[in-house]
Amino acid sequence: MNSLERRAARGAAFMDREQPGWENHINLATLDIGDNKFCILGQCCGEYNEGIQRLCLAYRPQMQYGLGFIAGGKCYQYPELTEAWIREIIFRLVHKITPAKAIQKPKRSAVRRMQPTHS
């Protein structure tokens, strides 16, 4: 995994905590990390600046960079960073995990609970 893929994975994990289900709102055909309207935060929050405000990242450029929301001063990396996000999102959509609350322990039968215990 290269550094761009690691940053996209960290950003995806961050989004999982802050806005569960975010990956379902991303249009992969228009995703462009270098565009304020079509980046991850743009598509989830309406616009990049609105997203960083909502997620308390406005004054934390290092964190924005580390989470793969920006490429920093390396504008030539935006297409590669976009591809890393696309791979991360496709992986999440394909390997959807059943929510934990959908997996429940079987309930004990009423008959078993009514039987006296032997001491």
Image (tube, rainbow, N blue to C red):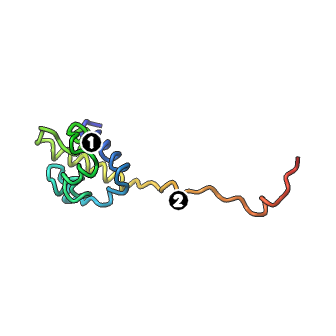
Q: Residue at the location (25% across, 36% down)? A: 3
Q: Amino acid at mark 1?
A: Leu
Q: Residue flagged by tag 2: what amino acid is it? A: Ala
Q: Position of residue 106 (x, y in %)?
A: 65, 58
Q: Residue at x 22, y 36 (%)?
A: 62
Residue 99 rendering spot, x and y as whole percentages = 48, 56
Please tell me which of labels 2 and 1 falls first in the chain.
1
Q: What is the x, y in percent for residue 68? A: 24, 43
Q: Alpha-carbon neighbours of circle 1 within 10 Å: few (<14), some, or many (≥20)?
A: many
Q: Is residue 91 left or right of 106 when viewed as pictured?
A: left
Would you name the residue on which mark 1 appears? Answer: 67
The picture quadrant where one finds residue 109 is bottom right
Q: Disc 2 marks which residue?
A: 102
Please, which residue is most extreme toward the right here?
A: 119
Describe the element under mark 2 as helix, strand or loop: helix
Q: How many numbered tags mark residues here?
A: 2
User: Dot 1: what SS?
Assistant: loop
Q: CA distance from mark 2 to mark 1?
A: 30 Å
The quarter of the picture where the N terminus appears is top left
Q: Quadrant of residue 45?
A: bottom left
